[in-house]
Amino acid sequence: MPGQSMESRFSLSLGNLYSNKSNILSGDEGVGTEHQREIRPSLRMSYNITHNFSFAFELPFQFRKIVVTTADGIGNERSSGIGDAEISTVWMRELSESNGRFYIGGLSLSAKVSTGRNNLLESGARLDEHLQAGSGSYDWQLGGALSRSTCASELFASLYYRTNGTNDYRYHYGDAALYNLGGQWPLTDWLTSSVQINGRYASRDSDHNDVVANTGGWVTYLSPGFKVSLSRLSGVYAAVQIPIYQKLFGVQTEKAVLSTGISFQL
């Protein structure tokens, strides 16, 4: 949050996200199930240009695996590579202060650029869209956040909308709305706990303007986490997103997502 940091402050974080989901196959894919797994380490750099305005750049590296189970047996495909970079700006401002409570509002705009390859091949054939390192499209996200902070805790809420482009192979990931509500509280001088509700609604994907089955829908996660302060300007964190509500289109299942990382302010 730029409103809580010194201006001209540079921050660096190394993070990793592990996620997996499953769905049934459809159409010419055959009859069976498909299990997708992803490990995504990333480097994020941010700079507070002023007390209220910051700029950030994030570059992920994708490791993906799809396991397909049909009547003919089990097969799997893997891929890896640099993912799509994201450039974002955040503007925040203190709205009011009352009895030691600070109310802060903010706006965020980000753009995902197509730095990851979207034409990965195996044996001369293009890999499945979900195995490509990048989406092959340029996407935008706009949103806002509100928080209430005291010296002992913080409560926050945010809402974002992401609109996705269409790549050269005419695949379009469904546009999505993201909503978050949570809080964090210090347990000791060096340990902070957090609990969030993270949710997403995504429209169905399309391929050559045809709806892709078993994509999109609602999912809501309960996300406990913690941060350990290594020094005044650095710390490590971990959080797990546990699905508590799913109303997905077709037959799909979202599973737990694990996020870990370390951050530094310079």
Image (cartoon, helix red, strand yellow):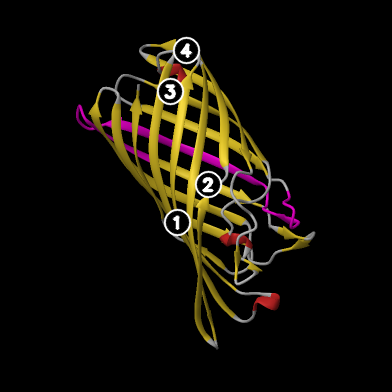
User: Which label is found at residue 157?
Assistant: none
In the picture of the structure, the residue carrying the numbered disc 2 is: 199
Q: Which one is earlier in the sequence, the residue at label 3 or at label 2?
A: 3
Mark 3 secondary-structure assignment: strand
In the picture of the structure, the residue carrying the numbered disc 1 is: 19
Q: Do labels 1 and 4 touch, CB within 8 Å?
A: no
x, y percent for residue 172? 71, 53
| Dot 1 crowding, Cα within 10 Å, few <14, some 14–19, many 20+ | some
| Alpha-carbon span between mark 1 and mark 4 | 35 Å
- Count of numbered circles in the view: 4
Mark 4 secondary-structure assignment: loop
Mark 1 secondary-structure assignment: strand
| Alpha-carbon span between mark 4 and mark 3 | 18 Å
x, y percent for residue 177? 62, 43
x, y percent for residue 28? 70, 77
Up the image or down, 141 lies above or below 36; here it is: above
Q: Do labels 1 and 2 touch, CB within 8 Å?
A: no
Q: Amino acid at mark 4?
A: His
Residue under the point 45% across and 24% down: 1
Q: Amino acid at mark 1?
A: Ser
| Dot 2 crowding, Cα within 10 Å, few <14, some 14–19, many 20+ | many
